[in-house]
Image (tube, rainbow, N blue to C red):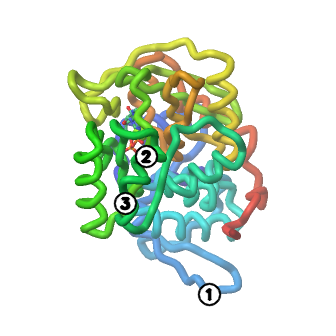
Amino acid sequence: MKIAMLARNPDLYSHRRLVEAAETRGHQMDVINTLLVYMNITSHRPDLRYGGERLTGYDAVIPRIGASVTFYGTAVLRQFEMMGVWPLNESVAIGRSRDKLRSLQLLARAGIGLPVTAFAHSTKYSDDLIEIAGGAPVVIKLLEGTQGIGVVLGETHNSAKSVIDAFRGVKSHILVQEFIKEAGNTDIRCLVVGGKVVASMKRSGAEGDFRSNLHRGGSAQIIKITPEERSTAVRAAKIMGLNVCGVDLLRSNHGPVVMEVNSSPGLEGIEKTTGKDIAGRIVEFIEQNAKPNKTKTRGRG
Ligand code: ADP
Ligand code: MG
């Protein structure tokens, strides 16, 4: 097969591993810098160009679109979809997953367990927001944050209120969320490929940090997840419409709650922690599923 990977940095561990896994299985994999692709969006026969050449003949495209380039990246991916190239994750699903509010609304509608979460435009009702989220301590999150940046613990009612006011003062949108204290500064990353949890790990925050992001100095260990956790992760992936994703869960007193669903999960932590060949599993999934014009939405919706 001829596979395109939309990625800005070919040297990242995840990207190197995907190239390696594809080449080991006899496929051609071209790493394409998302931001250098350009296109005629009005052509009747949609095309894409890169370095003066047309991008043609691809059987599949792997979107590894960074959070900071979601807008342009999903436009490029949509163009691939309109050309009939099968995407590992569809542009519409990636768009959904990048909006924390929209994701939580979709998951809530389907009855997935979530931390109680409040949202408002105005700061007039901060007291009420904190109340809805169960009262201090509460977690305050920037809607567009990643890697733990923009996630703050408001330990008292007044400090939570100040953080809400500060974020809103700079026009940022935020969520106010129940703090799942019993999770003990630990979350569970489930890696879902094609409707199955193929690996999972427990991540623990660095000393004194409630955020367990590896980018924030957290550490990872193997964990055995419960059947309920497994089915929650699989359902969350399905609701988001993602073939490959990282579903992050917290173990709460009221069962597993989904914190977020990541459409470009990093492979380094999960492969090194579990010793599993996740890149290989992803390429196998592509082999089994990539067919021309099989994109569900073809960029619609
Ligand atoms: P990001 O997208 O920046 O990774 P997350 O929502 O995943 O933001 O939050 C970062 C980390 O903060 C999580 O991995 C988890 O360890 C911790 N965390 C987030 N929300 C909660 C919560 N409601 N209760 C307890 N811990 C939380
Ligand atoms: Mg996270």
- Note whether 228 is above or below 84 in the view shown: above
User: Type of residue at label 3?
Assistant: Ser
* Above or below for 293 versus 163: below
State the residue position of label 1: 42
Q: Would you say the residues marked 2 and 3 are in contact, meaning their CB atoms lie under 8 Å apart? A: no
Q: Residues within 10 Å of mark 3 (few under 14, many from 20)?
A: few
The numbered dot on residue 131 is 2
Question: Which label was assigned to residue 140?
Answer: none
Image location of residue 201, percent across then percent down: 47, 21
Compute the Cα span from label 1 to label 3. Answer: 26 Å
The C terminus, quarter of image: bottom right
Tell me the SS state at disc 3: helix
Q: Residue at x 56, y 46 (%)?
A: 28
- The residue sitting at 62% across, 55% down in the picture is 93
- From the viewer's perspective, tell me whether residue 274 is left or right of residue 284: left
Q: CA distance from mark 2 to mark 1?
A: 50 Å
Amino acid bearing label 2: Glu
- Would you say 50 lies left or right of 164 here? right
Residue 54 pos. (x, y %): 55, 72
The image quarter in which residue 58 lies: bottom right
